[in-house]
Amino acid sequence: MEVLKYDLIIVGSGIAGLRAATAAAWASGGRISIAILSKIQAMRSHSLSAEGGMSAVLYPDKTGDSLELHAYDTVKGSDFLADQDAVQILVEYAPKEVRYLERIGVPWSREPDGRISQRPFGGMSIPRTTFAADKTGFFIMSTLFSETRRFDNINVYHEHFVTKFIIEDGEFRGVTAYDLKRGEFKFFYAKAGIIATGGAGRLYRFTTTAHSTTGETLGYALRAGLAIKDMEFVQWHPTALVPSGILVSEAARGEGGYLINKEGERFMKRYAPQRMELAPRDIVSRAILTECMEGRGFQHESGMCYVGLDLRHLGEEKINRRIPFIRELAHKYAGIDVLSEPIPVRPAVHYTMGGIHTDTWGRVLTADGKWVRGLWAAGEAAAVSIHGANRLGSNSLSECSVWGRLTGEQAAKYVLETSRLPAPDGKLLDVAKGEESRIFDRLLHKEQNAPSPYEVKKQLNDIMEEHFGPFRHGSSMAEGLAKLKKLREFSSFRVVDSSRVYNQNLKDALEVDGMLDLAMVVGIGAYARSESRGAHYRLDYPKRDDVNWLRHTVAYMYGGELKLLYTPVTITKWQPEERRY
Amino acid sequence: MKSLVVKVKKFDGSRTWWQEYKVEVPSEKISVLDILVKIKEEQDPTLAVRYSCRMAICGSCGMVINGVPRLACQTLLSELGDSHIVVEPLWNHNVVKDLVVDLEPDFEKVRAVKPYIIRDVKEVYESDKEFGQKPEELERYYNFAYCIQCGLCMAACPILGSNDKFLGPMALNAAYRWSADSRDRGWEERKKLIDTEDGVWPCHLAYTCSAVCPRGVDPGYAIQLLKAAILRKKRP
Ligand SMILES: Cc1cc2nc3c(=O)[nH]c(=O)nc-3n(C[C@H](O)[C@H](O)[C@H](O)COP(=O)(O)OP(=O)(O)OC[C@H]3O[C@@H](n4cnc5c(N)ncnc54)[C@H](O)[C@@H]3O)c2cc1C
């Protein structure tokens, strides 16, 4: 086992992780050593699938927009579960980040006068979503990755799969990782760490997220004594392509697309008469599923019910200029020409509102609210929390960039202020070696009687889809929980591949192992929350209950058991009100 | 259901062989990637293949399919017009295992041409202003910024087959993309890196790179524009 020493380790190379790296590199004046670890090649992180855009108040004098309005939209969109002090930070820093990204070379779409263009998005009362055609995530990701190339003190470790966070005496010590390409196991020993490992969409089957968005690190975080917040809030995006689940960006509706049912009717008028197709995602998703349940949807050959996303009236010129990728994807993966036919869409799992419990600045907290010294979390993996019970589209890229920057700067400062890292002691090395042996000796040592990771993942997906979907019910969730518990009894998996170099079978088993713990967190959190709020909708408790449930769920592991506790929501300006659109 | 035969070139670190799999697929609309994942999950978990976004934007699943470098997720069975599929790892690269090749030398070449805005770094990090850009300035480099670093162009380049020091289409495209950006001031610096024996000059215009690019980037054209800029002594 190789031991590598770094000042700062960033796990994850999405927009959050890369922005953390450039911020730390600059803030430290090149004086600290930084490692970025990514389980896939670093420039291929899921962030690049983001299509629609990034929210920010850029030209308030010209558009009448304001930070206050952006904050209010976000809080209302969150169904009042967002922490309002955190939201304030989001809206203040987002414009600075859009301009930073402009200076490092992001090809933002422009108006004739050179201003950065902005488009309307769901739940945003003013067009404030900045974009680079409909490949915004791709352009931000690839530009940020390029930008890391400027700094000699940023070291990128492609295809290093992190298997464990090591925390001792309330302090971060490093991570262990499986280097796929070389087939080696490594201990990255460090002063500080930032977890930026993204969401967990693949807990479900029908999802817009990449195959790599599995969320195992959140399961590992629990085992390391960290806490997970608000995990029951899972976002369904209203418009995923049938049957693949590939996203049709909200930009399609932002640019004026309609949703129609079998009768050709714009059904959103019954659910959100004012905002119509641009109501928040939880509302539009439930509307589509309701149309389906009431028999007004179309039927796909795969058995899925869907509705039509109609772009025909937008015209070819606008479609090619503003949403060319949507046209390409619909053509390729659904065989549809958007100029002549509506696109077949239905809701799919898209975003994980919950994540690692942190404070407003992204510092990682244990369940009792203590900072784990030297550790931060940013991006979709973290719950700071600005999205509360429902994220507004385009707020995530802003979040990734803002908290990437903030955590990177803080970590750099922390590293410079703490004394030199001593050589790792024997106890620490034993922990790392124990992990190596768990993986290379036990898991790799073919367990004939254990189940295949693919079989377990399939069952997990079935349970999540059936029992923890967009419409939930206590009795069904109780059943789902029982099934999950049974599935969790598998503590090992059959790894057929016995090689060390690029053993994806082993990697897949490690993913499923972490996902099982995380699924339990979604399950028990959802079952306990006896109200409906944002994306968490219960048929047996269809109303929001601010008296009992205006609070965050915090899950943690104690003596091998998952426990829940609740923390208050920070309200600075806006008292909860009824959410109408 | 439709039956097909998929032939995969496997490599386990020492041995190379062809492995055949029989697969049943529900429709012709399935991608080669979905077929490979199906094989991996149902028949042969040792099969190594990179993939992630499955929507042709992350650049993971580049491989040679029926003799042409392509992204597996972007290649539908219906487009191959054949129920015999032959898959091998990208040419011109060292194979790590099965369909997984080492692309890190390509990434290092990109790094060598300084793929970022060259100008006062302090201004980049400490000002809070936009550098600014007009739509027509955006147009000059926009298409070249679509590169997803999948490596297909590097696999298709005939020069790289015999001279692996050649910077190649991926890095040279990046050199053009950054030099043609109105916000960049780095042409003179970058020119020194590419006006060299292994820089732009080995390219002899085969344009196979552009032919296989899954995002229509046209790196071959980028190389010609770089040559022209060098000869005319005028930044792109
Ligand atoms: C299709 C789609 C479109 C979207 N469009 C938009 C949009 O227009 N606007 C918007 O605001 N939001 C959008 N979102 C949401 C947004 O893209 C994501 O929330 C955001 O990109 C997450 O970025 P991240 O940096 O947190 O993580 P990611 O980009 O997901 O990166 C996670 C990183 O963690 C690494 N990692 C994970 N596990 C491990 C491990 N065990 N070991 C080592 N490394 C690991 C991965 O390799 C990767 O580098 C969209 C989401 C989807 C699915």
Image (cartoon, helix red, strand yellow):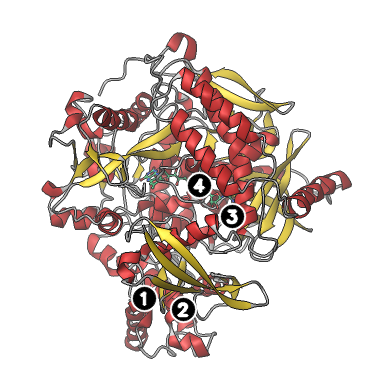
The reply to whether callout 1 and callout 3 are in contact (CB within 8 Å) is: no
Label 2 crowd (10 A; few <14 / some 14-19 / many >=20): many
The reply to whether callout 1 and callout 2 are in contact (CB within 8 Å) is: yes
| Left or right of residue B40: residue A278 | left
**At 43% across and 16% down in the image, what residue appears?**
A531
In the displayed orientation, state which residue is furthest to the right. A426
Looking at the picture, which amino acid does disc 1 mark?
Val
SS state under label 1 = helix
Quadrant placement of the C terminus of chain A: top left
Q: Residue B99 location in percent, x, y?
A: 54, 70
Which chain is mark 3 on?
A
SS state under label 4 = loop
Quadrant placement of the N terminus of chain A: bottom right
Mark 3 close to ligand 1, CB under 8 Å: yes
Looking at the picture, which amino acid does disc 4 mark?
Thr
Res. A113 visible in picture: no
**At 50% across and 47% down in the image, what residue appears?**
A213
The residue at which mark 2 appears reads as B155
Measured along the vertical axis of the image, is residue A549 above or below residue A157? above
The residue at which mark 1 appears reads as B212
How far apart marks 1 and 2 lie (CA) works out to: 9 Å
Mark 4 close to ligand 1, CB under 8 Å: yes
Give the camera-side residue of A116 and A282. A282
Label 4 crowd (10 A; few <14 / some 14-19 / many >=20): many
SS state under label 3 = loop
The residue at which mark 3 appears reads as A39
